[in-house]
Image (cartoon, grey):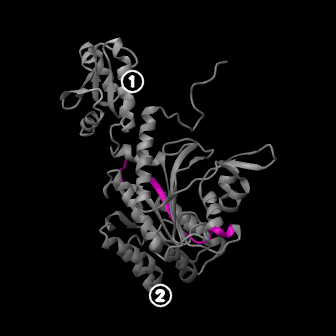
């Protein structure tokens, strides 16, 4: 039986064309993170399963991780997410590091789940987190970074919206307005999370099946229906809990002052991980009806380090997967043409005796950080430009008997068709000519 040429289900082969797209996306991710002074970190691909048990949900542990016993009988997993590793690393150094701590990574992650649009078993994810920022400041910076990142790709507020809520509002509603707790509040969180994904009939049915009184059900529905800051303000004012909106009001006011409020939408149904987030939470939604889904999510948390016996340290972060982001960029036609490589110069020669001179020229030009494609054998002139085009070269060099005699080279700009002759030893002039492209 012959081996399959296909990659493992849910993973991808990155041929040069696909890798150019990934590199383009990763380079912009890194550029934006660095512009906010976030430092790049990474961790091991393997962690002990106990680390994920301490932080992650049962579904991930029981159904989604790739786990095995190593030769030392340690129960380990290929990392399904980066946050536990991040927590373990920050727990080691946070007492000595100046705050706030700003970190980012783009790890390779694996989860055993059914491959579908926007979700594979293997993906890369941009993670950005800030620890120890003053209340509300880290949240606003993370939102700014998200907007900067997506607009750097060419997106605008017609392409995406950041839907924001505050878990403290939900907690106040449950504790002081509905006066529920424990298992019932957990069920209500689940209903809120599903409320926009089901019909109104199905939503009413889920609410009716709870142990809420008629008055509580009406209040709960009114919370879900308070779909703007103004409506939520009225709802909370009627129930003497208006102070619960303070952090969210500050964030929206700051966004207005920076003229980025058009990217933000208040959404009371955003609650995210129930055992993890403690404050502001958000999801970035694609506004194109062909791709109606969240492409990113995150929020604030304070108990991440407690699993290591450390005191609470406020943090906020987000994760953006490369699969969903690529789908978003393709849906809105925001990817540049990366169908061919990008090189500065294709060097050809038309006489065998020019071979070593072409190699010497390439050697010198690479010292100037130019991307140079060398041809290894004499090439007929009519074949030079079609091959150079396939290699994505902006300039073409060619040498024949005349150039060999004069120790020169002809260089042509493939866009402007301008052609100039240079002495082979005049590397500085050749570099200047090419860099003016």
Residue that mark 2 sits on: 240
Location of residue 412 with respect to 225 vertically, above or below: above
Q: Quadrant of residue 375?
A: top left
Mark 1 burial class by Cα count in 10 Å: few <14, some 14-19, many 20+: some
**Residue 165 shows up from this direction:** yes
**Left or right for 110, reference 259:** right
* 356, above or below 392, in the image: above
Q: Residue at x 70, y 67 (%)?
A: 308
Disc 2 secondary structure class: loop
Percent position (x, y) of residue 2?
A: 64, 19
Say left or right for 390 vs 402: right
Dot 1 falls on a residue whose secondary structure is helix
Circle nearer the viewer, 2 or 1:
1
Q: Work out which quarter of the rendered image holds the C terminus and state it.
A: top left
The one nearer the camera, 52 or 366, is 366
Closest to the observer: 195 or 156? 156
Q: Nearer the viewer, residue 195 or 282?
A: 282
The stretch of residues the image draws in magenta is 287-307
The residue sitting at 65% across, 59% down in the picture is 56
Mark yes or no: residue 245 visible: no
Task: Quarter of the image for the N terminus: give it.
Answer: top right
Q: Which residue extends farthest bottom?
A: 240
Label 2 Cα crowd, 10 Å radius (few <14 / some 14-19 / many 20+): few
Q: Which residue is mark 1?
A: 359
- In x, y percent, where is residue 372? 37, 30
Q: Nearer the viewer, residue 137 or 292?
A: 137
Q: Is residue 426 shown in magenta?
A: no
Residue 56, relative to residue 169: is it above or below?
A: above
């Amino acid at each position: 039986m012959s081996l399959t040429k296909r990659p493992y289900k849910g993973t991808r082969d990155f041929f040069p064309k696909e890798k150019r797209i990934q590199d383009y996306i990763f380079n912009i991710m890194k550029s934006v993170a660095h512009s906010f002074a976030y430092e790049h970190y990474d961790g091991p691909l393997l962690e002990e399963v106990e680390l994920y048990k301490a932080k992650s949900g049962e579904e991930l542990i029981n159904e989604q991780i790739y786990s095995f016993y190593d030769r030392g009988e340690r129960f380990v997993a290929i990392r399904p997410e980066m946050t536990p590793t991040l927590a373990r690393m920050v727990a080691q150094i946070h007492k000595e590091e100046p705050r706030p701590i700003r970190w980012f990574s783009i790890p390779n992650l694996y989860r055993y789940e059914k491959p579908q649009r926007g979700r594979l078993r293997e993906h890369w994810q941009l993670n950005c987190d800030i620890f120890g920022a003053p209340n509300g400041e880290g949240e606003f910076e993370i939102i700014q970074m998200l907007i900067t990142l997506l607009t750097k790709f060419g997106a605008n507020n017609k392409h995406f919206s950041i839907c924001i809520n505050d878990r403290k509002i939900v907690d106040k509603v449950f504790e002081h307005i509905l006066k529920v707790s424990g298992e019932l509040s957990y069920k209500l969180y689940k209903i809120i999370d599903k409320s926009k994904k089901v019909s109104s009939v199905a939503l009413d049915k889920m609410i009716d099946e709870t142990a809420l009184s008629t008055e509580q059900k009406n209040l709960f529905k009114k919370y879900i229906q308070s779909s703007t800051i103004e409506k939520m303000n009225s709802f909370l004012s009627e129930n003497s809990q208006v102070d619960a909106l303070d952090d969210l009001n500050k964030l929206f006011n700051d966004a207005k002052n920076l003229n980025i409020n058009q990217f933000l939408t208040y959404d009371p149904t955003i609650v995210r991980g129930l055992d993890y987030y403690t404050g502001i939470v958000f999801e970035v939604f694609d506004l194109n009806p062909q791709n109606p889904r969240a492409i990113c999510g995150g929020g604030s948390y304070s108990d991440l380090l407690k699993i290591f016996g450390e005191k609470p340290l406020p943090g906020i972060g987000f994760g953006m997967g490369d699969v969903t982001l690529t789908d978003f960029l393709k849906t809105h036609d925001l990817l540049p043409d990366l169908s061919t490589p990008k090189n500065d110069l294709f060097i050809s020669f038309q006489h065998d005796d020019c071979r070593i001179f072409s190699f010497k020229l390439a050697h010198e030009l690479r010292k100037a950080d130019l991307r140079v494609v060398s041809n290894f054998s004499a090439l007929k002139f009519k074949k030079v430009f079609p091959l150079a085009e396939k290699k994505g070269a902006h300039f073409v060099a060619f040498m024949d008997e005349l150039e060999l005699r004069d120790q020169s080279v002809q260089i042509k700009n493939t866009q402007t068709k301008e052609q100039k002759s240079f002495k082979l030893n005049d590397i500085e002039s050749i570099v200047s000519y090419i860099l003016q492209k």
